[in-house]
Amino acid sequence: MILIIEDNEDIRENLEELLTLDGFIVTTADCGIQALAQTKKQIPDLVICDALMAGMDGYEVFSAFRRNEKTCTIPFIFSSSISGKAEEQKAKALGIAHYLVKPFDEAEIVWCINDCLQASPIASPADIK
């Protein structure tokens, strides 16, 4: 299961539809707090998270996942409207698997998902389709 954490409703719904049509099982959250509450019920195989959100930003969400032994190995893909090597390097240095600048295309996000799942110790692509 892929968890999408995105505060922009249009982006969240479009990404959910796109990935569902590609055969992935998807759940969504509109903020970090909601996402953390959801993981108490079901642990995702992968998280796609907006880096910049009101309240709890993507970096804080990532940190909360890493502090929990049940979620500490889940791969993260950040999506952000901020482009630039410095921001991408910051995310990569923390352990974010991929950093995508919005708008990104379907092929790019699907490639990142498959790359994460192939490298993940907790899931393979067959596990979440």
Image (spheres, rainbow, N blue to C red):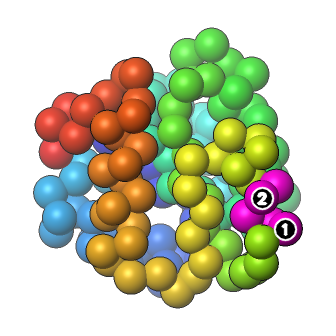
Please state if 98 lies on the left or on the right of 106 as rendered: right
Please state if 104 lies on the left or on the right of 24 as rendered: right
Where is residue 123? Give x, y as percent: 31, 28
Seen in the picture, residue 30 relative to 14 is either above or below; the reply is: above
Work out whether residue 23 or residue 85 is closer to the camera in this orientation and state it.
85
The residue at the point 22 percent across, 53 percent down is 24
- Residue range in magenta is 86-90
> Which image quadrant is residue 16 in?
bottom left
Residue type highlighted by circle 1: Ala
Please give the label number shown on residue 89.
2
Residues at badges 1 and 2 in contact (C-beta under 8 Å)?
Answer: yes
Seen in the picture, residue 101 relative to 69 is either above or below; the reply is: below
Work out whether residue 70 or residue 110 is closer to the camera in this orientation and state it.
110
Q: Label 1, on which residue?
A: 86
Where is residue 43? Give x, y as percent: 44, 28
Q: Quadrant of the C terminus?
A: top left
Is most of the magenta stretch helix, strand or loop?
A: helix
Residue type highlighted by circle 2: Gln
Q: Secondary structure at mark 2?
A: helix
The residue at the point 55 percent across, 16 percent down is 70
Where is residue 122? Give x, y as percent: 38, 22
Q: Is residue 33 visible in the rendered structure shown here?
A: no
Give how far apart the Cα atoms at labels 1 and 2 are: 5 Å
Crowd tier of the residue under label 1, counting other residues whose Cα lies within 10 Å: few below 14, some 14–19, many 20 or above: few
> Which image quadrant is residue 111 in?
bottom left
